[in-house]
Image (cartoon, rainbow, N blue to C red):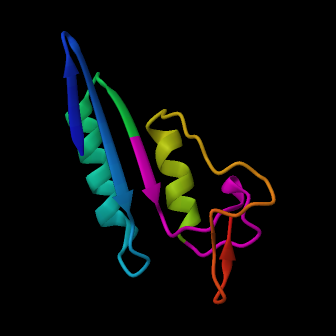
Amino acid sequence: MVELILDTLKFYTASMYLDITEKLDKRIKLINDILQLANTSGILTTMDSNSRSRMWHDKLINGRDKKLEEFPISKQLYSIMNEENVMKTFQSTKHSAS
């Protein structure tokens, strides 16, 4: 997480990786703590959530999707998700994700 200050403007940014072997509750609490810290300032978060969801144009789900879909909505956050297109953001021989 980085705090940027310019005159009276304060802005936060955080980049996150959610390990697929970790329980989401711990990470969602961390995200919530970051939002509390940012309070009324601007915040931008980016993350590799290791979550599959139809909300971000994946054809499959992996059980992590519901919590990560509901959290931004419950906090009235704007979410910019993967855009649907032919290029995937990740693909391996094991599985492919959008």
Left or right of 93? Residue 2 is left
Tell me where residue 23 sits by quadrant.
bottom left
The region drawn magenta spans 45-63
Residue at the far top in the pictured view: 8
Point 40% across, 37% down: residue: 44
Looking at the picture, how far across and down is residue 43, in whole percent?
Answer: 35, 32
Residue nearer the viewer, 74 or 48: 48
Q: Is 37 located above or below residue 15 in the figure?
A: above
Asked if the magenta segment contains residue 56, the reply would be yes
- Along the line of sight, the residue nearer the viewer: 42 or 75: 42
Q: Where the C terminus falls, by quadrant? A: bottom right
Q: How many labels does the image show?
A: 0
Horizontal and vertical percent position of residue 91 = 65, 75
Residue at the image position 35 percent from the left and 76 percent from the top:
22
Magenta stretch contains residue 85: no
Q: Is residue 33 above or below residue 49?
A: above
> Residue 41: x, y in percent?
29, 23
Q: Residue pushed farthest right?
A: 86
Q: Residue 8: which quarter of the image?
A: top left
Q: In this view, does 91 lie above or below 25?
A: below
Instruction: Tell me what residue is drawn at x 39 percent, y 67 percent.
Output: 18
Majority secondary structure of magenta residues: loop
- x and y percentages locating residue 34 in the rendered image: 26, 43
The reply, left or right, for residue 3 in relation to residue 59 is: left
Task: Please indicate whether residue 1 sits to the left or right of residue 79 in the image.
Answer: left
Q: Is residue 85 left or right of residue 76?
A: right
- Which residue is pictured at 61% across the width and 47% down the height? 81
